[in-house]
Image (tube, rainbow, N blue to C red):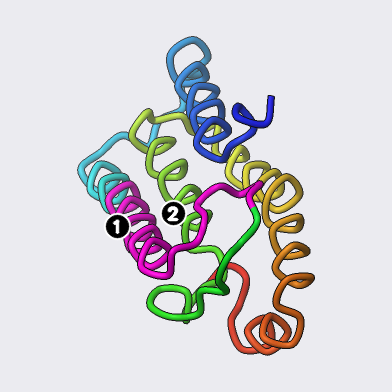
Amino acid sequence: MKYLDLPPIWLAGFAALAWGQSRYFPMGLSLDGGITDLLSGLLIGGGIVLMLMAVVEMRRHHTTLNPHGAPQTLVQSGIFKRSRNPIYVGDVLILSGLILRFDAVLALPLVPIFVWTLERRFILPEENRLRRAFRMDFARYEGKTRRWV
């Protein structure tokens, strides 16, 4: 089960819920238009770029990408200067973009639910591991870098 409890699996599940809402329960609501298409593309593309930047930085520091794994290094450079969780920010941007792309207006409340899920299932346990492993370094990092943006 640990291998299925990963953020991309949760993202796919939430995206499937949004797609299902747009496909089977549109309720006559729509945000469809050129601006929405542009915004959805920017959100999805921005999320992917943010995630790639974070992955490159984590690989450069030879630390794990697995949210359940033990960190080898506290990454504080690159995109991690701006956000302690840029991959999760990317996940949220991608979900938001997909909801707009699918024109799933009623699925918009999934975004804060997804954020809450990421925080409870992944971010808080990860930060606790980092806190135990890097003590004062993590305390300083946590004080100067916000969790999301």
Label 2 residue SS: helix
**As shown in the figure, which amino acid type bears the numbered disc 1?**
Val
Q: Which residues are magenta?
A: 43-69
138 and 143: which is toward the camera: 138
Q: Which residue is painted at 56% across and 40% down in the image?
A: 7
Residue 79: x percent and y percent?
40, 73
Determine whether label 1 and label 2 are within 8 Å by CB.
yes
In the image, residue 137 sits, relative to residue 27, either above or below, namely below
Q: Which residue is painted at 55% across and 26% down in the image?
A: 13
Residue 58: x percent and y percent?
43, 64
Label 1 residue SS: helix
In this rendering, position of residue 120 left or right of residue 118: right
The residue to which callout 1 is attached is 49
Q: From the image, which quarter does the N terminus lie in?
A: top right
Instruction: Indicate which disc residue 90 carries.
Output: 2
Q: Which residue is painted at 50% across and 79% down in the image?
A: 76
**As shown in the figure, which amino acid type bears the numbered disc 2?**
Gly
Residue 50 shown in magenta: yes
Residue 31: x percent and y percent?
37, 37
When asked about the image quadrant of residue 60, the answer is: bottom left
Residue 30 shown in magenta: no
